[in-house]
Image (cartoon, grey):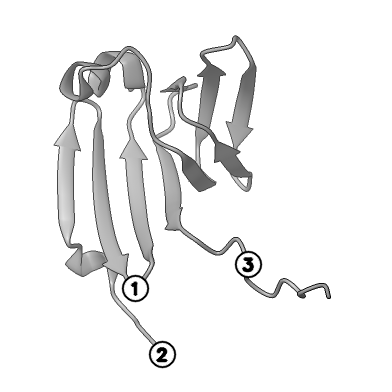
Amino acid sequence: MLAVRSISQADESRDMPHGHLDVVSLEGVDFGVARFEPGWRWSQDVGPLAGTTSCQFHHNGYIAQGRLHIRMDDGTEKDLFAGDVFVCDPGHDAWVVGDETAVVFDFAGSIHDYAKQETT
């Protein structure tokens, strides 16, 4: 199988305070490009829409531009910079650090067994 889509023809586009998300779905994978402006914070800009106090989604991501800070519900915190690849479990808040728009690529899908050699 070969599947190709352009993010410019997203299946879904969502605006939120201080941000925008475009999503393309392919067989087994959802790919999103989020643009978070300075001042964006999940708990303030998305939380009221989601109805939860922290983000309850798992993220496999790449920071293409800017900087984010993530705080897990257990208190673990980390700054993410352009060029960082990350995995983030449900139960977190995140916000833009600095005055540059953060551009985040988010991959959701199962590649857990990709190129994994079976043992006998």
The residue at the point 25 percent across, 24 percent down is 46
The image position of residue 26, as x and y in percent, is: 32, 71
From the image, tell me which residue sits under label 3.
113
Cα–Cα gap, marks 3 and 1:
16 Å
From the image, tell me which residue sits under label 2.
1
Q: Amino acid at mark 3?
A: Asp
Q: Is residue 112 above or below residue 85?
A: below
Query: Does dot 1 land on a helix, a strand or a loop?
Result: loop
- Asked if the residue at tag 1 contacts the one at tag 3, i.e. Cβ–Cβ closer than 8 Å, the answer is no
- Asked if the residue at tag 3 contacts the one at tag 2, i.e. Cβ–Cβ closer than 8 Å, the answer is no
Farthest front residue in view = 120
Q: Which mark is residue 10?
A: none
**Residue 49 image-quadrant placement:** top left
The image position of residue 4, as x and y in percent, is: 34, 81
Q: Amino acid at mark 2?
A: Met
The residue at the point 26 percent across, 56 percent down is 23
- Asked if the residue at tag 2 contacts the one at tag 1, i.e. Cβ–Cβ closer than 8 Å, the answer is yes
In the image shown, does 44 or 3 lie closer to the viewer? Answer: 3
The residue at the point 63 percent across, 67 percent down is 113
Compare marks 3 and 1 and give the one earlier in the sequence: 1
Compare marks 2 and 3 and give the one earlier in the sequence: 2
Mark in the foreground, 2 or 3: 3
Q: Is residue 63 visible?
A: no
Q: Which mark is residue 27?
A: 1
